[in-house]
Image: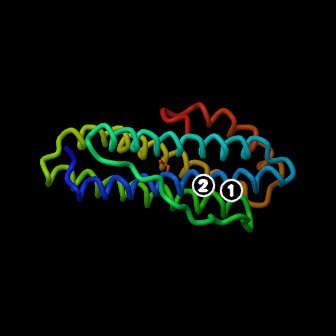
């Protein structure tokens, strides 16, 4: 059984994953109308799907452990971005926040001696290592590319293989 405190905290994480999915969906929609960003578009849409899967995993876990997973209302995410670099900076900062939130949940699980939830959360701990790494790589590459159009062309091409390259698939 989950404690009430843990149920609430896991439901908050459901909200966070849903917001992530929504934020990356908006990035995908923005990228889709920019010229020449096919790879990046695919990357954002796929990432949005991944976040939905993270949310679903939590929903099933909460319900299986005697709680009730609440499907949350969502805020409208940022819809436009001054540059691709800015979008990836936001994505990276967001992933760091998600990692911190997962770490707080792990702390709570340990302090409540809820080892089942602790065990369940390890998947998210590993996932966040991968997601932060990929987001950091993208930011580093975009920093190097700067305003270079041919660099951006290659970035857009390469990101298609980065999608499937990580453990998470991003
Ligand atoms: Fe769910 O990992 Fe990104 O946010």
Residue 33 horizontal side relative to residue 123, left or right? right
Quarter of the figure with residue 90? bottom right
Q: Check the image and report above or below for 91 versus 156.
A: below
Q: Looking at the picture, how far across and down is residue 78, in whole percent?
A: 65, 66
Q: Residue 45 location, x and y as percent?
A: 67, 44
Residue 108 lies left or right of residue 32; in this view the side is left
Marker disc for residue 22: 2
Residue 91 circle label: none
Q: Which residue is mark 1?
A: 26
Query: Looking at this rendering, what residue extends furthest in the right direction?
Result: 35
Residue at figure coordinates x 73%, y 65% from the top left: 80
Q: Residue at the spot x=55%, y=34% of the render? A: 169
The x, y position of residue 164, in whole percent, is: 60, 31
Q: Badge 2, how many Cα within 10 Å: few under 14, some, many 20+?
A: many
Give yes or no for contact between labels 1 and 2 (Cβ–Cβ under 8 Å).
yes
In the image, residue 87 sits, relative to residue 135, either above or below, namely below
Q: Residues within 10 Å of mark 1 (few under 14, many from 20)?
A: many
Q: Is residue 84 left or right of residue 74?
A: right
Q: Secondary structure at mark 2?
A: helix
């Amino acid at each position: 059984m989950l404690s009430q405190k843990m149920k609430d905290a896991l439901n908050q994480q459901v909200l966070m994953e849903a917001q992530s999915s929504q934020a990356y969906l908006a990035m995908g929609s923005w990228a889709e109308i920019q010229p020449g960003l096919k790879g990046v578009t695919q990357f954002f849409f796929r990432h949005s799907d991944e976040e939905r899967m993270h949310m679903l995993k939590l929903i099933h876990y909460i319900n299986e452990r005697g709680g009730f997973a609440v499907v949350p209302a969502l805020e409208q995410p940022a819809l436009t971005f001054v540059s691709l670099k800015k979008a990836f900076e936001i994505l990276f900062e967001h992933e760091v926040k998600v990692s911190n939130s997962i770490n707080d949940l792990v702390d709570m699980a340990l302090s409540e001696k809820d080892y089942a939830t602790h065990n369940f959360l390890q998947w998210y701990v590993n996932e966040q290592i991968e997601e932060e790494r990929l987001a950091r790589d993208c930011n580093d590459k975009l920093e190097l590319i700067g305003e270079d159009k041919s660099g951006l062309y290659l970035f857009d091409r390469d990101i298609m293989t980065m999608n499937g390259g990580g453990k998470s698939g991003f």
